[in-house]
Image (cartoon, grey):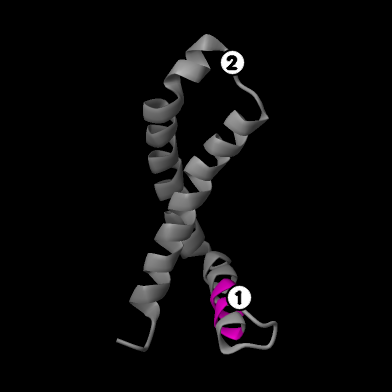
Amino acid sequence: MAPGSKSTASATRLVRDLWRSARRPAIFRRCALIALVVGTLLTVVNQLDVITGARADSSFMLRVAANYLIPFVVSNLGAMASLSPER
């Protein structure tokens, strides 16, 4: 992808729109609740052996953070899609 390409501009616009959407209080609360529930379930299902074995390291912490960040982003994308005038 070239720095001035259409794809780069689209990706930049998407990130900007995601940030703008996440800053809306109602959407942020809904996305945070979804991330809390789904992230906790994913962490328990996929990382329980690490948690109970006390073998947590930096890569474990990154995986746990991703368990919460990814559902937040996905639910924010869903909120954006439902508000989008392009249907």
Q: Amino acid at mark 2?
A: Arg
Q: Nearer the viewer, mark 1 or mark 2?
A: 2
Q: Please tell me whether residue 37 is drawn above or below residue 70 in the rendered image.
A: above
Q: Which residue is mark 1?
A: 16
Please name the predominant secondary structure of the magenta segment in the image: helix
Q: Which residue shows up at 52% across the image and 10% down it? A: 53
Question: Residue 1 versus residue 25: which sits nearer the camera?
Answer: 1
User: Where does the image place residue 42, in percent across and percent down from the top left?
Assistant: 40, 35
Residue at 68% in and 88% down: 4
What span is colored magenta in the figure? Answer: 9-15
In this rendered view, identify the residue nearer to me: 23 or 60: 60
Type of amino acid under label 1: Arg
Sooner in the amino-acid sequence: mark 1 or mark 2: 1
Q: Are marks 1 and 2 in contact (CB under 8 Å)?
A: no
Quarter of the image for residue 84 reads bottom left
Residue for point 35% across, 88% down: 86
Q: Secondary structure at mark 1?
A: helix
- Where does residue 23 sit, x and y in percent of width and height? 58, 66
Give left or right: position of 51 versus 9: left
Give the label on residue 27, or none.
none
> For residue 55, which numbered disc appears in the image?
2
Q: Quadrant of the N terminus?
A: bottom right
- Residue 3 x, y percent position in the rendering: 70, 82
Look at the picture and state if 86 lies above or below 47.
Answer: below
Task: Determine the image quadrant of residue 46.
Answer: top left
* x then y, percent, for residue 9: 61, 85
Asked which secondary structure carries label 2, the reply is loop
* Position of the C terminus by quadrant: bottom left
Q: Please state which of residues 57 and 36 is positioned toward the viewer in this rendering.
A: 57
Image quarter for residue 59?
A: top right
Q: Is residue 28 above or below residue 13?
A: above
Q: Would you place residue 55 above or below residue 38 in this image?
A: above
